[in-house]
Image (spheres, grey):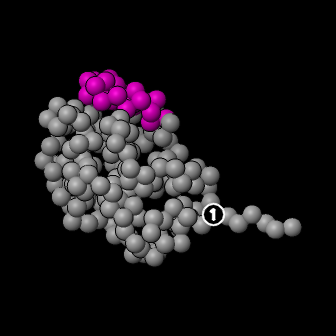
Amino acid sequence: MATVKEKQRCGWAGTDPLYNEYHDKEWGVPSHDDQHLFEMLNLEGAQAGLSWFTVLTKRENYRKAFDNWDAQKIAKYSEKKVETLMQNAGIIRNQLKIRATIANAKAFLAVQQEFGSFDKYIWQFTGGKTIYNRFTSMKEVPAKTPVSDAMSKDLKKRGFKFVGSTICYAYMQACGMVDDHVKDCFKYHP
């Protein structure tokens, strides 16, 4: 009796079903939804110093805690709300990261006002198209690039927090601005 061959994935995806689903259905898939783009920017920032798996397992808790990533509501969070979030064991209780999310909501709304959508603004860094890389192994995938450097610099200038170049590159991968699926992965685009 033949066994079903397991899908070959990028090495970082491991074997956990949550990680596999994220890898298979989201990572490297172009997103043009402002709310999703806002969510991912904040989750990538929350990851700073931690593993993506830690953040991914808390994703639903983040959605509940941060009003399903409604930037209008988050921009108005009070000190009392910050204190409440600091007590929420379902999220990463780092005051700087929580305050960064509030600052990011304000900056996000300003970008939407200026450009018509956050999507229009953020995708300008890749010319509105996905960058398809042709890496053979995860060792070749960079932590940052000149594009993520430029994105980081501009986001910081606009008041965004936890948006260093490495975070921006991970964000670009998460939102499909960059497709870094390696050659032996079933999601690879030749």
Q: Tell me if I can see residue 54 in this picture.
A: no
Judge the density around disc 1: few (<14), some (14-19), many (≥20) Cα neighbours within 10 Å: few
Task: Name the residue located 41 percent from the left edge and 64 percent from the top edge.
Answer: 180
Residue under label 1: 7
Q: Is 65 a magenta residue? A: yes
- The picture places residue 111, in percent across and down from the top left corner, at 18, 37
Compared to residue 66, the image places residue 18 above or below, namely: below
Indicate the secondary structure of the residue bearing disc 1. loop
Work out which residue is located at the far right of the displayed protein and give it.
1
- The picture places residue 128, in percent across and down from the top left corner, at 26, 51
Task: Name the residue located 51 percent from the left edge and 61 percent from the top edge.
Answer: 187
Task: Name the residue located 32 percent from the left edge and 62 percent from the top edge.
Answer: 131
- The magenta span reads 61-85
Dividing the picture into quadrants, the one containing residue 133 is: bottom left
Compared to residue 119, the image places residue 81 above or below, namely: above
**In this figure, what is the number of numbered marks?**
1
Task: Name the residue located 23 percent from the left edge and 42 percent from the top edge.
Answer: 120
Q: Amino acid at mark 1?
A: Lys
Q: Tell me if I can see residue 82 in this picture.
A: yes
Q: Is 27 a magenta residue? A: no
Dividing the picture into quadrants, the one containing residue 72 is: top left
Depth order, front residue of 126/84:
126
